[in-house]
Amino acid sequence: MHQLFRLVLGQKDLSRAGDLFSLDDSEIEDSLTEALEQIKIISSSSDYQTNNNDQAVVEICITRITTAIRETESIEKHAKALVGLWDSCLEHNLRPFGKDEDTPHAKIASDIMSCILQNYNRPSVMALAIPIAVKFLHRGNKELCRNMSNYLSLAAITKADLLADHTEVIVKSILQGNTMLLRVLPAVYEKQPQPINRHLTELLALMSQLEQPEQYHLLRLLHVAAKKKQLEVVQKCIPFLIGHLKDSTHNDIILNILIEIASYEPVALNSFLPMLKEIGERFPYLIGQMARIYGAVGHVDE
């Protein structure tokens, strides 16, 4: 470990901690894993939560380390130690003290999070990080949870298979109010539909409480589910979809889902034709799409 890191972390010397920023990134890069392991020891000590000096030393060192990792693009080399420190934060209280005051370990977790999860396009880093990241969703820190959800949404774009193993945890987090994670579900449904199917009725019940973008992600999930051709899921979806057709914001995507269902299970839509007719009279521009549903049903029940 670099001599200055050894001095600052070994003696917890706050007066010298700022000097770390005078060193070139390349000069300290080889020391970063060892420094992170030393920080883990310090932050796990029994008096860390009340020791302001140690907290300040750790905060400065983490800032210096994460900066050096970004600048030298060495995240893959130091990911194990970084994720190890991140994981150790879960052993401590993360709930805010007051209205906005984070605990010392929540600060560490937050500072490390962006350095790790900004690398959502690096599979080796995500393989280490995602199993730890999802654990933070249920630790009572809303700000940490919100930021984590943003990064997990990005990870779902490139590595949905890694998130799929944690679908149950993600769904439960959504049902507890973390609706930002709805955007993850269409991607993980392809890999792990069963946990979502089990909670589908509860997820649909959220619709009226959601912001418009979140409503869109829920409907996108239903479109993916409809393509899977699972009759039990389809039967739960149809009354919900017909009920929301009157909302002009989403009636286009809803009709596309119904057309998908009509292509393989037209009988399921038979009893809803009078409602479709009524909605078609209110929104004439939808008649073209509705005609496709009528045609599909007509093939089996003229």
Image (tube, grey):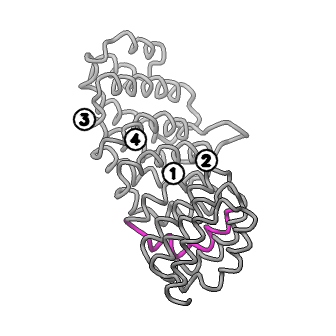
Query: Number of numbered discs present?
Result: 4
Residue 151, image x, y percentages:
47, 43
Please say if the residues under marks 1 and 4 sit with CB atoms less than 8 Å apart. no
Under circle 2, the secondary element is loop
For residue 77, the mark is 3
Q: Are marks 2 and 1 in contact (CB under 8 Å)?
A: yes
C-alpha span from label 1 to label 4: 14 Å
Tell me if 23 is positioned left or right of 255 in this view: left
> Mark 3: which amino acid?
Lys
**Disc 3 vs disc 4: Cβ atoms closer than 8 Å?**
no
Q: Position of residue 284 (x, y in %)?
A: 69, 62
The kind of residue on which mark 2 rests is: Asn
Q: Are marks 2 and 3 in contact (CB under 8 Å)?
A: no
Look at the numbered disc 3 and give the secondary structure of its residue.
helix
* Residue occupying image coordinates x 60% and y 70%: 290
Q: Amino acid at mark 4?
A: Leu
User: In the drawing, what numbered circle is on residue 141?
Assistant: 2
Foreground: 53 or 195? 195
Q: Which residues are magenta?
A: 191-207
Residue topped by disc 4: 85
User: Within the magenta stretch, is there residue 287?
Assistant: no
Q: Earlier in the sequence, mark 3 or mark 4?
A: 3
Element under disc 4: helix
Q: Nearer the viewer, residue 149 or 138?
A: 149
* Label 1 residue SS: helix
**Spatial separation of the CA atoms under disc 2 and disc 4:** 18 Å
Question: Quick one: label 1 or label 4, which is nearer the N terminus?
Answer: 4
- Compared with residue 245, is residue 21 higher up or lower down, i.e. above or below? above
Quarter of the image for residue 103 reads top right
